[in-house]
Image (cartoon, rainbow, N blue to C red):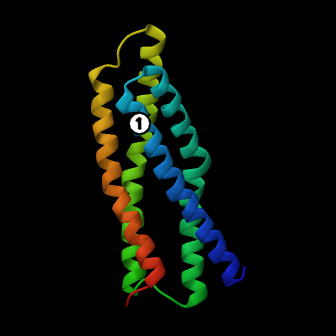
Amino acid sequence: MDYLTVKTIHIISSTILFGTGIGSAFYMLMANRRKDIAGIVFATRHVVIADWLFTMPAVIIQLITGLALMQIRGFNLNDKWIFYSLILYFFAGACWLPVVWIQIKMRNIAKSAMSNKTNLPAIYWKYDKWWLSLGFLAFPAIIIVFYLMVFQPS
């Protein structure tokens, strides 16, 4: 593939990755803050689906197209901006993997609470704190990756 095609795919997948992430985080955060179990069930269910349909493929495409762009442009891992971009990319991924597991747990707990007509147990809110903490760590990492990709500082 030529450079512009790969770059376009890379930009689109980064947009999908970032947009899905921030959109999912917003809706789940708002549902959790309202503490309406039906809303939480709806939000967690769809956040999990969005991760499988959009986030996971975008994560894979980002790595493949990023490495392809690196090769096409003649960059290498010794270039500081590439090195730091990859470190931050994998750091954000290390935050995202447990978040996926946490979201599935939260979805299942909320579904069970709604079925049993009970309040959400304390463990749900413990997972919520971990979910928020990991998101607050991953978000700035992705912002810095965007900066590095655009400005490519030496």
**Residue 114 pos. (x, y %):** 46, 15
Which residue is found at the position 38% from the left and 44% from the top?
A: 98
Which residue is found at the position 45% from the left and 72% from the top?
A: 146
**Residue 57 pos. (x, y %):** 60, 55
Quadrant in which the C terminus appears: bottom left
Query: What SS does tag 1 mark?
Result: helix
Assess disc 1: are there few (<14), some (14-19) or many (≥20) residues with their C-alpha within 10 Å of its C-alpha. Answer: some
Please tell me whether residue 95 is drawn above or below residue 81 in the rendered image.
Answer: above
Residue 6 shown left or right of residue 82 in the figure: right
Q: Which residue is mark 1?
A: 30
Q: Residue furthest right?
A: 1
Q: Which of the pair 145/93 is nearer the observer?
A: 145
Please tell me whether residue 22 is drawn above or below residue 83 in the rendered image.
Answer: above
Q: Which of the pair 114/57 is nearer the observer?
A: 114
Q: Amino acid at mark 1?
A: Met
Q: Which of the pair 83/25 is nearer the observer?
A: 25
**Residue 53 pos. (x, y %):** 62, 46
Residue 37 shown left or right of residue 48 in the figure: left
Which residue is found at the position 42% from the left and 48% from the top?
A: 97
Quadrant in which the N terminus appears: bottom right
Q: Which of the pair 9/36 is nearer the observer?
A: 36
**Residue 50 pos. (x, y %):** 57, 43
- Total numbered labels: 1
Please tell me whether residue 65 is drawn above or below residue 100 in the rendered image.
Answer: below
